[in-house]
Image (cartoon, rainbow, N blue to C red):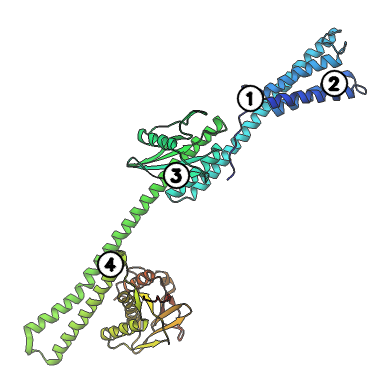
């Protein structure tokens, strides 16, 4: 990153430099030689114009005092070489005294004006550099979304503004927890760490030690305090004087505001997540109150009727009640299984991944589905030589069963649900396809969201659990267009095939 080099302003308070004096003397010497050569073809009064040009160039190049020195030297050279009697500082004619006086005044005014113009030009350039640096810093901060990213931007631009090094040190409960610096090879010595600790404990600025004195190389000051934590920013003394100090001050103000903005954004995001979790909990409780009450009421009613009437009921009626109890119990069992699977996924419980035969999982899911949906036709096709995969067999079977459940609820009577598994490159593709109405385009992006359902009898957990399980296993799930027909829906799970490990 290009450094901000704010050179000291050249004004009337700035003494002339050795290089400026040497340049001034050189220009006057060149002007003297040029005037001497031109005196053969031009009148002697034209020499003063050449000296005025030298004075102007000296003042514009080296500053106010150098311009006045050039005016004095030009006055002496004009008097010594071009005013009678030459090679002396005496003046023979009274009009020459007036001419030399006017020349000295004009040269001094020229040097003064040119010096002031140089001073204003330098100030304008440095202000432009300062604004460019602050603009770059503001643009950089606008794209930073975390506290660490803001810290990186702060130290990089501080190092650029000071022309040295910068550091950001984080303290929590009185102990340093992290720091970052710029440039990349920046280090903090023991004296620097002690100064940063002092600034953190006293919540005050700790100035850098003077050149040649022992102590910290950095000036440290608190940047942002939140609870038991505090951020201390440090920077080496700027090379550009007061203007660089202004740049550093502006950077620190923007940095504090940016850190506060990021922290507030984090708090807002956490509040939004908490509100979303609360909304999901409310939706889950509402769903539980309905989907648990319905099968429980049916079971309770059937059991009560059987107990009260007993043998007085016809055989067919008792069989219907027992079938209803079995159906509602299965429905309740599936619902609880989904809730347990979702709880495991959201709690972050580590999956038990073992080498598993995909064919066995699909056959188990189909057998379970045939008990749950005896009227639904299920077709299973397994590809040859399917390799083993590392997966949680219980959760993967639950995911496949949820896809079958979803397909069965949307399939028209008599239409089979087709299941297949085949090796596709380095992945195993498990597909569940139905002949139902399909999924509307506006619902495709939300089909795997929790509590989103297109069926009045659905809760909206089945497909969300499928995606959670497959993602946790390192695979992917997608809704694809069926290959055989134009209608229906086809869900495909893709699991990576890992090389089998040889057991010792």
The Cα atoms of the two marked residues, 1 and 3, are separated by 36 Å
**Label 2, label 4: how far apart the Cα atoms are:** 98 Å
Q: Which quadrant of the structure image shows residue 376?
A: bottom left
Q: Which mark is residue 47?
A: 2
SS at circle 3: helix
For the residues labelled 3 and 4, say whether their Cβ atoms are less than 8 Å apart. Answer: no
Q: Position of residue 400 (x, y in %)?
A: 34, 78
Q: Earlier in the sequence, mark 1 or mark 3?
A: 1
Neighbour class for label 1 at 10 Å: few (<14), some, many (≥20)?
A: many
Q: In the image, is residue 350 above or below residue 370?
A: above
Left or right relative to 48: residue 444:
left
Q: Nearer the viewer, residue 74 or 168?
A: 168
Image-quadrant location for residue 93: top right
CA gap, disc 1 to disc 4?
74 Å
Q: Badge 2: how crowded within 10 Å, few (<14), some, or many (20+)? A: many
> Could you tell me if residue 297 is visible in this image?
yes
Q: Secondary structure at mark 2?
A: helix
Question: First in sequence: mark 3 or mark 4?
Answer: 3
User: Which element carries disc 4, helix, strand or loop?
Assistant: helix
Which residue in the protein does label 4 denote? 343
**Mark 1 touching mark 4, by CB under 8 A?**
no
Residue 489 can be seen, yes or no:
no
State the residue position of label 1.
Answer: 11
Query: What residue did someone put label 3 on?
Result: 258
Image coords of residue 473 (percent x, y) = 37, 71
Q: Earlier in the sequence, mark 1 or mark 4?
A: 1
Residue at position x 62%, y 31% from top?
Answer: 123
């Amino acid at each position: 990153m290009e450094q901000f080099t704010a050179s000291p302003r050249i004004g009337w308070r700035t003494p002339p430099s050795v290089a400026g004096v040497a340049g001034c003397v050189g220009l006057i010497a060149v002007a003297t030689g040029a005037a001497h050569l031109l005196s053969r073809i031009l009148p002697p009064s034209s020499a003063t114009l050449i000296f005025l040009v030298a004075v102007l160039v000296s003042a514009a190049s080296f500053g106010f005092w150098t311009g006045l020195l050039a005016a004095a030297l030009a006055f002496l050279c004009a008097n010594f070489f071009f005013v009678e009697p030459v090679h002396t500082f005496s003046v023979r004619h009274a009009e020459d005294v007036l001419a030399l006086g006017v020349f000295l005044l004009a040269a001094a005014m020229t040097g003064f004006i040119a010096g002031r113009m140089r001073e204003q030009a330098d100030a304008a350039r440095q202000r432009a550099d300062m604004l460019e640096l602050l603009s770059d810093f503001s643009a950089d901060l606008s794209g930073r979304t975390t506290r660490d990213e803001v810290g990186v931007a702060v130290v990089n631009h501080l190092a650029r503004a000071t022309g040295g090094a910068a550091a950001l040190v984080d303290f929590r409960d009185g102990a340093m927890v992290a720091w970052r610096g710029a440039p990349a090879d920046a280090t903090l010595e023991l004296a620097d760490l002690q100064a940063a600790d002092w600034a953190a404990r006293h919540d005050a600025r700790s100035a850098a030690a003077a050149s040649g004195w022992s102590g910290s190389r950095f000036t440290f000051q608190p940047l942002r305090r939140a609870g038991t934590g505090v951020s201390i920013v440090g920077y080496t003394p700027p090379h550009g004087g007061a203007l660089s100090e202004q740049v550093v001050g502006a950077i620190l103000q923007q940095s504090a505001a940016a850190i506060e903005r990021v922290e507030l954004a984090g708090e807002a995001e956490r509040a939004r997540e908490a509100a979303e979790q609360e909304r999901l909990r409310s939706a889950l409780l509402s769903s539980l109150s309905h989907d648990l009450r319905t099968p429980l009421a049916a079971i309770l009613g059937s059991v009560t009727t059987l107990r009260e009437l007993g043998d007085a009921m016809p055989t067919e009626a008792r069989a219907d009640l027992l079938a209803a109890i079995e159906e509602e119990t299965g429905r309740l069992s599936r619902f609880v299984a989904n809730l347990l699977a979702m709880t495991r996924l959201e709690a972050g419980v580590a999956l038990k991944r073992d080498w598993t035969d995909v064919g066995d999982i699909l056959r188990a899911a189909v057998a379970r589905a045939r008990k749950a949906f005896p009227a639904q036709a299920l077709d299973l096709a397994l590809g040859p030589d399917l390799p083993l995969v590392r997966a949680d067999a219980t959760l993967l079977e639950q995911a496949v069963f949820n896809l079958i459940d979803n397909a069965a609820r949307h399939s028209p009577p008599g239409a089979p649900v087709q299941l297949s598994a085949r090796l596709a490159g380095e992945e195993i593709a498990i597909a569940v396809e139905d002949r139902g109405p399909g999924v509307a385009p506006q619902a495709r992006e939300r089909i795997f969201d929790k509590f989103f359902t297109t069926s009045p009898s659905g809760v909206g957990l089945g497909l969300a659990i499928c995606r959670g399980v497959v993602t946790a296993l390192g695979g992917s799930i997608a809704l694809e267009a069926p290959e055989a027909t134009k209608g229906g829906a086809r869900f495909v799970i893709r699991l990576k095939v890992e090389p089998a490990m040889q057991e010792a």
